[in-house]
């Protein structure tokens, strides 16, 4: 038994030595690779010169000042807009007063019972005075009515609501004002709603148009 045990232990030791010997070439190769890497020339990190550092700092300072200047300009613009157009919404709502005065005047003028009466004349006079006072107050605050009648249609200030046949005016001329428009300084508060002229269609043109419609 003792001999068998000795033989087994001897064979085990021999196996371990064999494994160690087989592993040795791999370990040697790893060690060799590590040494080769250590021997490779390392890239030198160049320190920036004093001139380069100064140039970089100057660039950063210039960028910072430029950003500060842009912010200052934006702030100034926002402050000016708030001061000049702060009452924009209020002014737009206040235009309803003029619209209501015009509607009231139109209703009174259309009432057959009041036509040609002194009461109507006095009432209309008072309404005109109130309207003039309102427009005067608006103008003092740079809110001005847009001139429309007999002007050429300008999409920046006018909105055409209808076309009216009229050979006495050039096509596109405003011949009716449905609702007056206003500006506040250089900004449009609301456009004028208008009717513009167009050429009167001749009978021949109308006949041709009708034929085309029927053919379609």
Image (cartoon, rainbow, N blue to C red):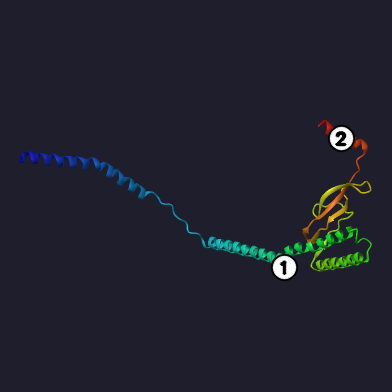
Q: Residue 164: which numbered mark, if any?
A: none
Left or right of 80? Residue 113 is right
Label 1 – label 2 distance at C-alpha: 58 Å
Residue 178: horizontal and vertical position, in percent?
Answer: 84, 54
Q: Nearer the viewer, residue 49 or 125?
A: 125
Q: Nearer the viewer, residue 62 or 174?
A: 174
> Residue at position x 28%, y 44% from top?
28
| 11 w.r.t. 194: above or below | above
Q: Nearer the viewer, residue 21 or 71?
A: 71
Residue 5, quarter of the rendered image:
top left
Spot the residue most to the front.
Answer: 113
* Mark 1 or 2, closer to the camera: 2
| 109 w.r.t. 209: above or below | below
- For the C terminus, the image quarter is top right
* Dot placed on the residue nearer the N-terminal end, 1 or 2: 1
Q: How many marks?
A: 2
Left or right of 8? Residue 100 is right
- Is disc 1 surrounded by few (<14), some (14 to 19) or many (20+) residues within 10 Å? few
Residue 61: horizontal and vertical position, in percent?
Answer: 58, 64
Q: Residue 210: which numbered mark, if any?
A: 2
Label 1 with label 2: CB-CB less than 8 Å: no
Label 2 sits on a secondary structure element that is helix
Residue 84, quarter of the rendered image:
bottom right
Residue 55, quarter of the rendered image:
bottom right
Q: Which residue is mark 1?
A: 83
Residue 21: horizontal and vertical position, in percent?
Answer: 21, 41
């Amino acid at each position: 038994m003792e001999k068998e045990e000795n033989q087994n232990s001897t064979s085990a030791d021999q196996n371990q030595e064999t494994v160690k010997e087989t592993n040795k070439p791999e370990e040697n190769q790893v060690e060799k690779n590590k040494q080769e890497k250590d021997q490779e020339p390392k890239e030198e990190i160049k320190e920036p010169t004093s001139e380069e550092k100064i140039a970089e700092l100057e660039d950063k300072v210039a960028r910072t000042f430029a950003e500060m200047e842009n912010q200052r300009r934006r702030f100034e613009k926002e402050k000016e807009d708030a001061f000049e157009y702060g009452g924009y919404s209020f002014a737009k709502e206040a235009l309803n007063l003029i619209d209501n005065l015009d509607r009231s005047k139109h209703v009174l003028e259309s009432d057959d019972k009041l036509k040609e009466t002194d009461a109507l004349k006095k009432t209309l006079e008072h309404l005109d005075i109130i309207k003039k006072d309102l427009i005067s107050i608006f103008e003092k605050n740079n809110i001005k009515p847009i001139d429309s009648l007999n002007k050429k249609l300008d999409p920046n200030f006018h909105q055409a609501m209808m076309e009216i046949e009229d050979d006495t005016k050039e096509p596109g001329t405003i011949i009716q004002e449905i609702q007056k428009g206003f500006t506040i300084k250089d900004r449009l508060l609301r456009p004028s709603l208008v009717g513009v002229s167009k050429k009167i269609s001749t009978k021949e043109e109308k006949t041709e148009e009708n034929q085309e419609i029927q053919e379609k």
